[in-house]
């Protein structure tokens, strides 16, 4: 999925969901070295030293698995799910972007809540019903309208076709997380069918390329597809390690910028050449999604953001969206900061 360039505009729902999922993912599933990596770079921007230290302390408590801190984020996520999230909640200027952000909000909320359950099983009775409602919302025609308009068909009802619909990897990640905690849930058959369809589409192309929209390929979306299949295997006990290994290798060899190590935002479906610059946002998402499949590759991808994109100005800390670029014989940075 594409990401709007105005990254100063932060929408609360998806930010909370993303932080819940990103922070908790690396605590629950990743080895200590990976956790340390993310801890170092996950510094909240603040306007003064006091607030910076407060936010650092809050982030550390999340990384350390403090249930009270996690519950604060979880309650905000639950409130949004109970209220209901639609594309109309976002005003990006693009109906497609709005739809993508709605999907991302539900997906990240489900992943975050699932990871709290993994860390604190006693919360299962409270959070599992909310996860189920979030996944149900992801499967509605209204939630998938942006993709249906692009392809001329609804992706979840066209699984037997070769149309890509790679954005469904986000939905499948949520389905797989639900499956992890509720193996016999009523949507398990959807998880089965979607996983098999996405895997078939990946395997039938020479380089594991599945289009998000016609003639549009976004590596972060491919990472979501790969991660969703790996998490499906974890949840069900099935083994797709061999095709996944091949797909991860394709990703590592074709979609990373040699100089910066960042993931290209978009590539050409035919030539596999990049058609958009590498960006930190897509790289961070890719690292997170790939961590379900290969923590070593995910950690390497994330290191590129940590080592090259972190920006500190006085007490302000941010992540540069773009790597260094050459401008008229000099080296500069894009000014967009997250």
Image: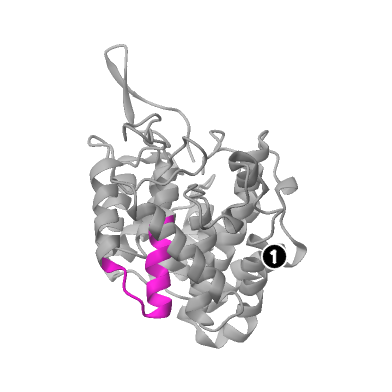
Q: How is the image coloured?
A: one colour
Magenta-drawn segment? 225-241
Q: Nearer the viewer, residue 117 or 220?
A: 220
Instruction: Kindly state the secondary structure of the residue where label 1 is placed.
Output: helix
Q: Residue at x 29, y 48 (%)?
A: 251
Q: Residue 227: x percent and y percent?
A: 40, 61
- Crowding at mark 1 (Cα within 10 Å: few <14, some 14-19, many 20+): many
Would you say residue 229 sits in the magenta stretch? yes
Q: Nearer the viewer, residue 214 or 282?
A: 214
Residue 310 in the image: above or below residue 186: above
The residue to which callout 1 is attached is 81
Q: Residue furthest front?
A: 160
Residue 300 in the image: above or below residue 313: below
Would you say residue 96 sits in the magenta stretch? no
Q: Residue 169: x percent and y percent?
A: 48, 57
Is 74 left, or right, of 163 in this rendering? right
Q: Nearer the viewer, residue 318 or 249?
A: 249
């Amino acid at each position: 999925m594409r990401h709007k360039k105005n990254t100063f505009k932060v929408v609360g729902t998806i930010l909370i969901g993303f932080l819940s999922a990103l922070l908790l993912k690396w605590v629950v599933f990743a080895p200590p070295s990976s956790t340390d990596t993310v801890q170092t770079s996950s510094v909240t921007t603040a306007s003064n030293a006091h607030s910076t230290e407060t936010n650092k302390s809050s982030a550390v408590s999340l990384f350390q698995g403090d249930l009270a801190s996690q519950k604060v984020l979880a309650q905000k996520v639950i409130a949004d799910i109970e209220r209901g999230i639609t594309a109309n909640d976002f005003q990006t200027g693009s109906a497609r972007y709005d739809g993508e952000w709605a999907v991302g909000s539900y997906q990240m909320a489900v992943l975050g809540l699932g990871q709290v359950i993994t860390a604190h099983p006693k919360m299962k009775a409270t959070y599992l019903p909310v996860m189920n409602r979030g996944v149900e919302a992801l499967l509605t025609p209204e939630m998938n309208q942006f993709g249906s308009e692009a392809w001329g068909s609804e992706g979840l009802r066209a699984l037997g076709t070769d149309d890509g619909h790679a954005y469904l990897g986000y939905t499948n990640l949520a389905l797989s997380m639900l499956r992890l905690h509720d193996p016999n849930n009523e949507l398990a058959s959807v998880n089965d069918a979607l996983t098999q369809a996405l895997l078939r589409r990946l395997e039938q192309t020479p380089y594991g390329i599945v289009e998000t929209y016609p003639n549009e390929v976004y590596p972060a979306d491919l990472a979501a597809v790969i991660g969703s299949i790996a998490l499906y295997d974890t949840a069900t006990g099935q083994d797709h390690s061999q095709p996944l290994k091949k797909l991860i290798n394709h990703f590592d060899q074709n979609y990373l910028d040699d100089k910066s190590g960042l993931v290209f935002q978009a590539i050409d479906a035919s030539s596999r050449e990049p058609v958009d610059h590498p960006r930190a946002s897509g790289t961070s998402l890719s690292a997170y999604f790939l961590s379900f499949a290969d923590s070593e590759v995910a950690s390497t991808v994330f290191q590129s953001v940590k080592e090259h994109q972190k920006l500190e100005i006085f007490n302000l800390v941010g992540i540069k969206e773009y790597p260094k670029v050459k401008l008229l014989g000099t080296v500069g940075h894009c000014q967009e900061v997250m």
